[in-house]
């Protein structure tokens, strides 16, 4: 009886904490301006319990005890900063007392440990090395050393002001990422996920290789709100991978299709795995302009995957889904409404009413929450709605906290780059190593993105790489948004590229196939992920849909045609001469100037 009582108490505490976190972020949207040094520390205080306390209870007792102590200390430190925001603002980033040093030290330790528990060691190690460089970099010989930094200034800037933990990136997490994650959680708690699958099956199920094409559409739709390749594989893959295997797909291809299709969720507007919101802050470009710029490349990516699946289907003589596995038209219409209505509210509020993305997402959350009251059976069921609301609240709190832990840790690195001037020095190194050439610089940066992306999540890899490489690319003549999109896409390569390819590992497990075979097939299917970012550079009109739609569509046709030709050469033909001809045509379409 005591165990049951304890479980119920824990559930009640978790639900209360989740409600508080969601209410706080919604309140920020609808209540008006709140000072940064109040909102951001409270954001930290609200996410720490979800990293340290509401986790796997099977951890070692001392690990759990340490987590409890660190969570409480970190929350207290963050709340103290929020309560003393006015006073700290007047200190201009300098620590004045021993107590303030302790507050800063606790926050740094809490952020590093939160990131470690959320995503493992690599990112906290990089952040720790950055802190050591900031503290002792004056002893580094040569141009990579820096002037001594007063400890009071270093600690104050990183922890008590808006230059480190509470800097620009954390502002993105508080003001934009959290609200869109809540939106996605509300949709996923209801019938929207089934709506995605039904619409995909109705649109593509009857086509050649239909099960694989259903995966592409479902992953594009689901990924647009999940923003996570792994979450996408785990959700849509549970349906699509068994369906593909039943329809005759080899297991390696079934796993690869899902891994590649799901990876596209992080480049598909509107969420883009939080990348779009970080770009807003780092480039100063309006959110609506970013999602318009990202739209055509994302659609091209899924089109290339689609044609790759079709090539496999021709080779293997794969048919469509049988009629008994295709949803009825009435079911498609009803379930599709559960994501179409909130999306219509979101897009209408942004593009026609002119509201901010955050406010528009808040309105869409309200629309999605109302739809939780009913389901495909069109009955209003309050008990079912209460269960869905609980799933939405806890799912939102967990995902907001996970992303926040990543962003907070990355903020330390970005803060150190700014304080020490290391970012400028690395930019100079890139320019020197590439001898001032754009394409050699792009190749160096792409390799750095791939390597870093193997160890840390896409958004963190993008933030770190663009902090040091973005200035080099703009110096070489790229527009800021062009440079940021290039880096973001290449930070995503590690989802399907060995040796560390998270989406492939999950899909291979679900398909019960060797992960390396799945990875090699995924790289062939996902060739657009390697080529389209280069196409953005060779044909910059590709990302100018809002300003020059005709030129953008022409560039999309050339880049898309080139990628499809190369995909066909890799997958669809056996004769060497035909393959070489397709490769040559594809490269020409992507890279040869029109004039």
Image: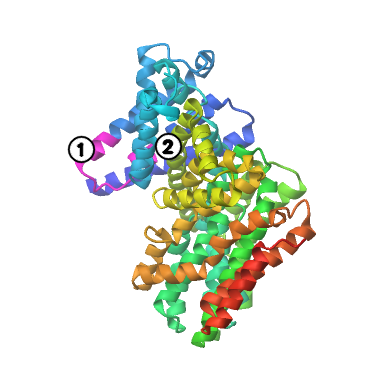
Q: Residue at x 50, y 63 (%)?
A: 262
The tag earlier along the polypeptide, 2 or 1, is 1
- For the stretch drawn in magenta, the main secondary structure is helix
The residue lying toward the viewer, choosing from 530 and 6, is 530
**Front residue of 9 and 244:** 244
Q: Which residues are magenta?
A: 46-67
- Local secondary structure at mark 2: helix
Residue named by callout 1: 62
Position of 82 relative to 64 (above/below): above
Q: Is residue 258 visible?
A: no
Pointer 1 local density, CA inside 10 Å: few below 14, some 14–19, many at least 20: few
> How many neighbours does mark 2 have within 10 angstroms: few (below 14), some (14-19), or many (20 or more)?
many
- Name the residue located 53 percent from the left edge and 55 percent from the top edge: 266
Looking at the image, is 395 positioned above or below residue 312? above
Task: For residue 242, say whether it is visible.
Answer: yes
The Cα atoms of the two marked residues, 2 and 1, are separated by: 24 Å
Q: Which residue is mark 2?
A: 409
Helix, strand or loop under label 1: helix
Q: Quadrant of residue 294?
A: bottom right
Find residue 530 and report its image quarter: bottom right
- Position of residue 319 in the picture relative to residue 99 (left or right): right
Q: Name the residue located 34 percent from the left edge and 30 percent from the top edge.
A: 109
Residue furthest to the top in view is 96
Magenta span contains residue 595: no
In the image, taking residue 67 as reference, residue 234 lies left or right, namely right
- Quadrant of the drawing holding the C terminus: bottom right
Where does residue 522 sit, x and y in percent of width and height?
Answer: 46, 68
Where residue 561 sits, quadrant-wise, is: bottom right
Q: Residue 524, percent across and down?
A: 49, 70
Q: Residue at x 64, y 42 (%)?
A: 480
**430 to 214, vertically: above or below:** above
Mark 2 touches mark 1? (CB < 8 Å): no
């Amino acid at each position: 009886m005591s165990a049951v009582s304890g479980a119920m108490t824990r559930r009640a505490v978790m639900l209360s904490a989740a409600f508080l976190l969601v209410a706080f972020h919604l309140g920020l949207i609808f209540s008006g301006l709140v000072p940064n040094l109040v909102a951001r520390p409270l954001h930290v205080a609200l996410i720490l319990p979800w990293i340290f306390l509401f986790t796997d209870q099977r951890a070692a007792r001392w690990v759990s005890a340490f987590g409890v102590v660190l969570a409480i200390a970190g929350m207290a430190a963050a709340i103290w900063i929020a309560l003393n925001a006015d006073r700290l603002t007047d200190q201009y980033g300098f620590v004045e007392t021993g107590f303030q040093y302790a507050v800063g030290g606790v926050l740094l330790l809490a952020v590093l440990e939160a990131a470690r528990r959320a995503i493992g060691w690599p990112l906290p190690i990089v952040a720790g090395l950055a802190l050591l460089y900031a503290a002792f970099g004056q002893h580094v010989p040569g141009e990579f050393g820096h002037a001594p930094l007063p400890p009071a200034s270093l600690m104050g800037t990183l922890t008590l002001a808006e230059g480190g933990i509470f800097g620009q990136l954390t502002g993105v997490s508080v003001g934009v990422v959290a609200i869109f994650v809540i939106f996605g959680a509300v949709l996923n708690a209801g019938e929207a996920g089934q709506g995605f699958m039904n619409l995909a099956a109705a649109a593509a199920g009857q086509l050649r290789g239909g099960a694989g094409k259903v995966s592409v559409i479902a992953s594009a739709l689901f990924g647009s709100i999940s923003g996570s390749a792994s979450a996408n594989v785990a959700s849509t893959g549970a349906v699509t991978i068994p369906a593909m295997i039943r329809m005759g797909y080899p297991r390696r291809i079934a796993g690869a299709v899902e891994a590649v299709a799901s990876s596209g969720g992080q480049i598909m507007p509107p969420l883009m795995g939080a990348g779009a919101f970080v770009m807003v802050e780092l480039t100063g470009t309006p959110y609506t302009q970013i999602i318009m710029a990202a739209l055509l490349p994302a659609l091209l990516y899924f089109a290339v995957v689609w044609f790759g699946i079709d090539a496999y289907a021709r080779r293997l003589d794969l048919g469509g889904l049988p009629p008994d596995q295709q949803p009825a038209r009435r079911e498609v219409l009803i379930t599709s409404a559960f994501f179409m209505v909130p999306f219509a509210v979101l897009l209408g509020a942004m593009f026609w009413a002119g509201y901010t993305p955050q406010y528009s997402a808040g309105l869409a959350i309200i629309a999605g929450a109302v739809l939780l009251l009913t389901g495909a059976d069109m009955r209003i069921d309050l008990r079912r709605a209460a269960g869905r609301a609980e799933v939405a609240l806890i799912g939102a709190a967990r995902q907001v906290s996970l992303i926040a832990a990543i962003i907070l840790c990355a903020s330390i690195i970005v803060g150190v780059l700014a304080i020490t001037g290391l970012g400028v020095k690395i930019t100079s190194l890139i320019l020197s190593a590439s001898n001032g050439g754009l394409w050699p610089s792009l190749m160096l940066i792409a390799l750095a993105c791939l390597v870093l992306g193997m160890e840390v999540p896409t958004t963190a890899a993008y933030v770190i790489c663009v902090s040091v490489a973005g200035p080099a690319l703009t110096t070489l003549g790229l527009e800021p948004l062009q440079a940021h999109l290039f880096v973001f896409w290449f930070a995503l390569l590690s989802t399907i590229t060995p040796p560390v390819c998270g989406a492939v590992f999950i899909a291979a497990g679900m398909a019960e196939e060797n992960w390396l075979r799945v990875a090699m097939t995924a790289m062939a299917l996902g060739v657009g992920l390697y080529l389209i970012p280069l196409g953005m550079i060779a044909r910059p009109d590709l990302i100018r849909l809002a300003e020059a739609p005709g030129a953008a569509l022409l560039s999309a046709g050339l880049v898309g045609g080139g990628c499809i030709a190369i995909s066909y050469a890799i997958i669809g033909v056996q004769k060497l001469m035909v393959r070489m001809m397709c490769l040559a045509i594809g490269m020409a379409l992507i890279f040869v100037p029109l004039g």
